[in-house]
Image (cartoon, helix red, strand yellow):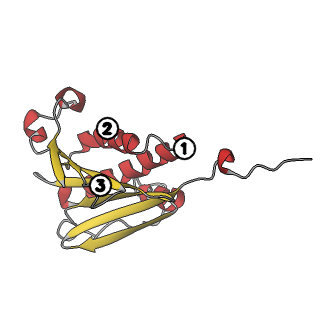
Amino acid sequence: MKVHPVRGLEGAMGDVSTNALSGLAVVTVDPDEYPSGHAVTVPGLASLAPLVRAYLRASVDLLPTETVDLVELLGAELFTNAVRHSRSGDLGGLVTVLVHSLPDRVQVRVVDAGPRDGQPSGPFLRPIDLDREGGLGMHLVATEASRWGTVYQRGHTSAWFDIDHAKTPSAQPVRRIR
C-alpha cells in the first residue's frame, strides 16, 4: 500500500487552512493485493465534501452517467453523515472513502471514527418526519442503492452501498429480423 500526499489543493478547498491539509493523503492500494479499489482519507471537515464528491466522480468516470451521478450523491451523503454524526467530525478526526469497481457492481465504503459518546452507533433509517430538517439521507441511500449496510469494527463504523451495473441497450443481445 502506498500513501501519496495531496499537493496543490489549497485553492480548491475554500476556507480550509494549509494546516488542515497537512494530514491529507491519497492511499493507493497495491493492485496485486486489492485489484478492484482505492481510497482517500481526509480530515472530517464538512468543507471537504466537494473534494470527496470530485474523488467519487473521478473513481467511476468510465461508467454510465447515471451510475456516476448516483455514486457521487450517495457517497457524499455517507461522508456528510460521518462528519456530522461521528467522532470523525471532531477536531483531528478522519474519514476514509473507498471505491471498489467490481465486475458486476461498484461498492463505496465510508469509514469513520465511530459514534460520539451517547449517540446511536451508526447510520440507520429514521422515521420520516417532514417537519424535521434532515433525516432523509439514509432513505435516499436505501432507495437508490442496490444494497447497503453498516459494519462496526474496532471502534470504527463503515457504512457502505453497492450500485449494480445497469444493462445498457448496447449490452443486450441483438435480434435479427428475417
The residue labelled by disc 3 is 31
Q: Position of residue 49 (x, y in %)?
A: 30, 42
Mark 1, other Cα within 10 Å: few <14 / some 14–19 / many ≥20: few
Q: Say what amino acid the circle numbered 1 marks.
A: Glu
CB atoms at circles 1 and 3 under 8 Å apart?
Answer: no
Residue 84 place in picture, x, y as percent: 26, 54
Tell me which corner region of the image, top left, top right, bottom left or bottom right, holds residue 121: bottom left
Which residue reaches farthest right? 178
Q: Quick one: label 1 or label 3, which is nearer the N terminus?
A: 3
Q: Which residue is mark 1?
A: 66
Q: Is residue 129 visible?
A: no
Mark 2 falls on what kind of element?
A: helix
- Amino acid of disc 3: Pro
| Nearest the eye: 96 or 113 | 96
- Gap between marks 1 and 3 measured at Cα: 27 Å
Which is more toward the observer, 118 or 95? 95
Q: Residue at x 73, y 52 (%)?
A: 173
For the point 25% across and 44% down, which residue is it?
46
Spatial CA distance of label 3 from label 2 is 27 Å
- x then y, percent, for residue 148: 44, 65
Q: Amino acid at mark 2?
A: Pro
Could you tell whether 121 is left or right of 132 in the image?
Answer: left
In the drawing, does residue 45 fall left or right of residue 173?
left
Residue 59 is left or right of residue 162, and the answer is left
Q: Residues within 10 Å of mark 2 (few under 14, many from 20)?
A: some
